[in-house]
Amino acid sequence: MLTNEYLKRVYEGLEKRNANEPEFLQAVREVLESIQPVVEKHPEYEKAGLIERLVEPERIITFRVPWVDDAGKVQVNRGYRVQFNSAIGPYKGGLRFHPSVNQGILKFLGFEQTFKNSLTTLPMGGGKGGSDFDPHGKSDMEVMRFCQSFMTELYRHIGQFVDCPAGDIGVGGREVGYLFGQYKRLTNSFQGGMLTGKGLTFGGSLARTEATGYGLCYFTAEALKCMRNDSFKGKTVVISGSGNVAIYACEKATQLGAKVVTMSDSNGYVYDPNGIDLAYVKDLKEVRRGRIKEYAETHEGVTYVADCSKVWTVPCDIALPCATQNEINKESAEALVKGGCTVVCEGANMPSTPEAIEVYLSNGILYGPAKASNAGGVATSGLEMSQNSERLSWSFEEVDAKLSGIMVDIFRKKETTIPRISGEEGVKLSCQDPSGEELTIQQVYAKVNPSVVAVVAEQSDGSAAVGTGVIMTESGYIITNAHVISGGKSCWVALDTGVTYDARLVGYDEDEDLAVLRAIADNPLPAAEFGNSDLLTVGDPVYAIGNPLGVELRGTLTNGIVSAINREVEMQGRTMTMIQTNAALNNGNSGGPLINSYGQVIGINTMKMSNSSLSEEEATVEGLGFALPISSVSFVVNDLIAHGEFLGTPTIGITVRTIEKSGGGTQVEVYTVDDALGAAEAGVQPGDIILEADGQPVSVTSDLLTVRRSHSVGDTIRLTIQRDGQTLTVDVVLYASK
């Protein structure tokens, strides 16, 4: 929903001028809604008319395309080139030949292309073009004559430093060859980089044909790995379309261990429960140019449905829409949810309606929008341009590796350049054991919510990542997840009152997924109270406060119980020990507090899981959220404040256990001693009884952990121990255990 007055005015003006272009208006509205936090933070954008310039194409070229069919009759089609934005490089985007092509659709595609191209980090602007010409059913000679006529007009508006088209729907290798040949003839020059998707014999790139489909799967695989601790292996995948993107998405998904069960065209879809016979589809579509119905006629056990929109009713784990815009509406999205789908990543441009996206988000579906997930094609087009400029040809493996790296980086957005600030000496996370009476839900919320902030990390492409943080000290130190601020160029935080503050980065550690910010505030901020997560037991009530799905739902409270403790969960290739809870967590909750019944923060909410590879293929898992326990968070946070980086968890180098004393009560006994660490160096032995740590009495294990938590790597802790009736004092250097 658009709430910013400036953006509302821009969109209303756009509606008046482009009332007959619904696809374009839809694409613009989605972007404007997503950038509202950035625009609200930067009122200077309005003064500069930045958004008005962003949504208006730099130029649109329209022209007639006369050509002669095989019967000798003159046909006339309409051609277009929308040169949308050249801020970071020459216009780049495909040509689409399809009866549905009109100015509004090409404007929407050019607008999307601008953002997609920027995400690749390659120097390419955004554009799109095409014609209402339909190559289906036309002879090679008819297609050639049309392409030559089309280029005869277009050539004067393009070039390797101006505008570099590529293929799209209806424009494959055949069409690109005809177009490039005519351009070369007209210009009397060989400008390899002005048109991509070329044949290998005249400057094309290996892996370009596969690029969009492969890139889609690389993006999806990284999303599954980072967000769900999962993979394609054993998953059932539904794919729409049977063109270039669909074919090679099917190929790569299969290589990654999935089973693809559907493909479609404009007439209908086929369902093959044994998995799509891709070799047949390649021959059918790339050689014979037939219809998908023929697949069912030649394969036993295959169902054909003469309605391509019903493909989303097929049960699946992963859906990859690769056909066309708005192919998934609200009804189709609800069918996907009903069928067990937990991941939707888009291979086509804007295949999901806004209502469908709402269904995804409200049902916890992992959603990859087309601007990011289908950028593989244009990324490899950019690589083709690089090869043409160097007069070199790279191997398939080299191009594929670069493509994979680009798609992974699009998802992860690793680089974080938020301005840094040094932490203050002596600032440490202070944790307390619970005391007094347990609080009601209302009391917990009233106590903690003022200390919960929305964290907005602005990205270099103008978008913003939104998460949650919790205020640690009145001086403005804030704890959040590292992935919340990943890729950020600047950052600000908003209190529950709506007051905002610029924030600086004190330090972060991607492996531990923790970051410390400091709000630039002149007044004290409401700090939370932090508890002892070591005291948690399964069944304890817990609460989460955060911003699920963005700033608009700021301050949402959910509740549940501790469903497991010391749960080992793999996240981004690292095994982490977490608190497991059934309190509802969603995108935007990351970095927020998990709270006990005393109103103490005992964990930092980090991830959720809705599907598990540990279960049977068809099973799904709901209600699994995970939080980093404060007992481990404290070590990381204290290092980030003191050093700007995490040095490692300080360890004494012993294992201990609580035992009964002969006269009543308990005491802590050293069970094992690590030969390579500080306790061994200080002479601690198995069987020693620890009486005190830094002068504090030790009677249970948590007493020792509390003292250790106040130290960092390199510090010395003084232990008073009892051995054979004698009392000894030893100084133990704390080593890193990371």
Image: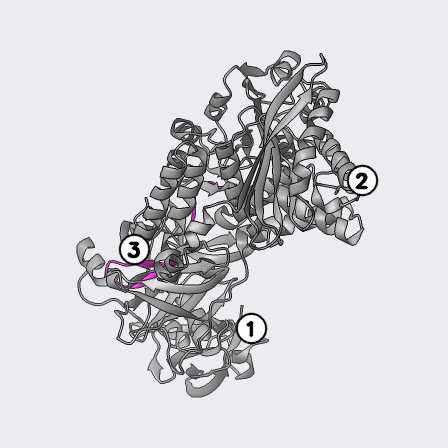
Q: As displayed, is residue 361 above or below residue 715? A: above
Residue found at the far right of this picture = 201
Numbered circle sitting on residue 448 = none
Q: Along the line of sight, which residue is nearer the eye, 566 or 398?
A: 398
Looking at the image, tell me whether mark 2 or mark 3 is earlier in sequence order. Answer: 2
* Residue type at the position of mark 3: Ile
Q: Tell me, for residue 545, which label it has, or none.
A: 3
Which quadrant: the N terminus? Answer: top left
The answer to whether residue 91 is visible is yes
**In this rendering, which labeled residue sits more in front, label 2 or label 3?**
2
Residue 410 on the magenta span: no
Identify the magenta region.
591-612
Camera-nearest label, 2 or 1:
2
Residue 291 in which image quadrant:
top right
Which residue is located at x 75 percent, y 52 percent? Answer: 389
159, above or below 131, in the image: below
Residue corresponding to mark 2: 202
Q: Earlier in the sequence, mark 3 or mark 1?
A: 3
- Between the C-alphas of marks 3 and 1, the distance is 40 Å
Q: Which residue is mark 1?
A: 674
Q: Position of residue 683 (x, y in %)?
A: 53, 83
